[in-house]
Image (cartoon, helix red, strand yellow):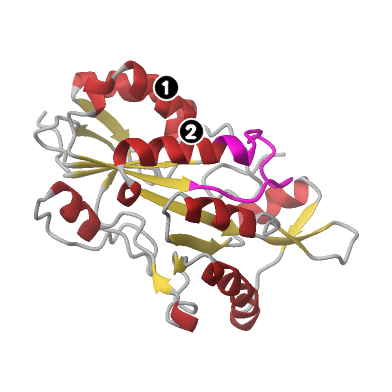
Amino acid sequence: MTPAISPIISCSRRTDVPAFLMEWVVDKIQKKRVDVSNPFNQKITTVSLDPQDVIAWVWWSKNYQPWIDSYTNNPDIFSQYNVHIFNFTINSVSELETGLVLPLSDRFKQLKWLIDLFGVDHLQVRFDPIVFYTKIGSNTILNNLSDFELIVSKISNLGIKKVIFSFAEAYSKVKKRMFHRGKVMLQLSKEEKRTEIGALLDISKQFDITLHACCQPELVGYKGIQQSHCVDGELINKLAKKKIKLTRDKGQREHCGCQKSRDIGGYTGIFKCGHNCDYCYAIPTRK
């Protein structure tokens, strides 16, 4: 069967492939194809990973050390492709991410390594998602914003000048998981979001950083907040010196600003994410 071709490979919105599945990635690159299961109807599609077909990889991770190790051991495998874009999620250290034990200092080192090798234009930092919650039996409102100023100060020193953010969506399975873990997720109103993001804007401006909203239409345009493009077709065209047709990815949420790509990750089996974050929409309800 002739594989499907996409000039942009997303790896992956669905799970943290760079943190947990780099041997799998290398194997599929060497085979120049990968079978991808549609998460809704389980239909299998074979996707080409041939460098003649793929212009850019867009990576998503909270921990790039396994990716860095894999690249160090196999540089020729990765350098076959014109462009690598890294969406690096760096949140405050909190009880919401029990499976992520890596300190911020290590993540900043990873960020610097990637910038030194690929250039700052290939990196996008995501402070995502912003979560407000209470403990069961308590009225005290908690959040995961404690390290925001530290994070923006560090990444600004490395040349990063924008941060992508979103507020967590209170999906039913997320609320159930958090309740099982002794927490109640709060859904903020538009005005509450603007109040909270206003404080983050004040901090960001001190470090010459702009904020870009992911699937937050009520915040785009507010005090200079821009629409995010986590898969940025214009940026990829600029870096690759190519002319990929700019097409919004209609398979994503209504207000997503991403360029069309092909995601090769999954949610179950080998793709079950080890971070086990309380707020994640991609994993099933579990304690």
Secondary structure that dominates the magenta span: loop
Q: Nearer the viewer, residue 286 or 120?
A: 120
Mark 2–mark 1 Cα distance, whole angstroms, equals 25 Å
Query: Which circle marks residue 94 in the picture?
Result: none
Mark yes or no: residue 191 visible. yes
Residue reaching furthest to the right: 137
- SS for callout 2: loop
Q: Nearer the viewer, residue 148 or 281?
A: 148
277, above or below 175, in the image: above
Question: How many residues crowd around disc 1 within 10 Å: few (fewer than 14), some, or many (20 or more)?
Answer: few
Question: How many residues crowd around disc 2 within 10 Å: few (fewer than 14), some, or many (20 or more)?
Answer: some
Residue reaching furthest to the front: 157
Mark 2, mark 1: which one is toward the viewer? Answer: 1
Give coordinates of residue 227: x percent, y percent: 38, 70
Mark yes or no: residue 21 visible. no
Q: Amino acid at mark 2?
A: Thr
Residues in magenta, as a range: 89-106
Question: Magenta span has 97?
Answer: yes
Q: Which residue is mark 1?
A: 69
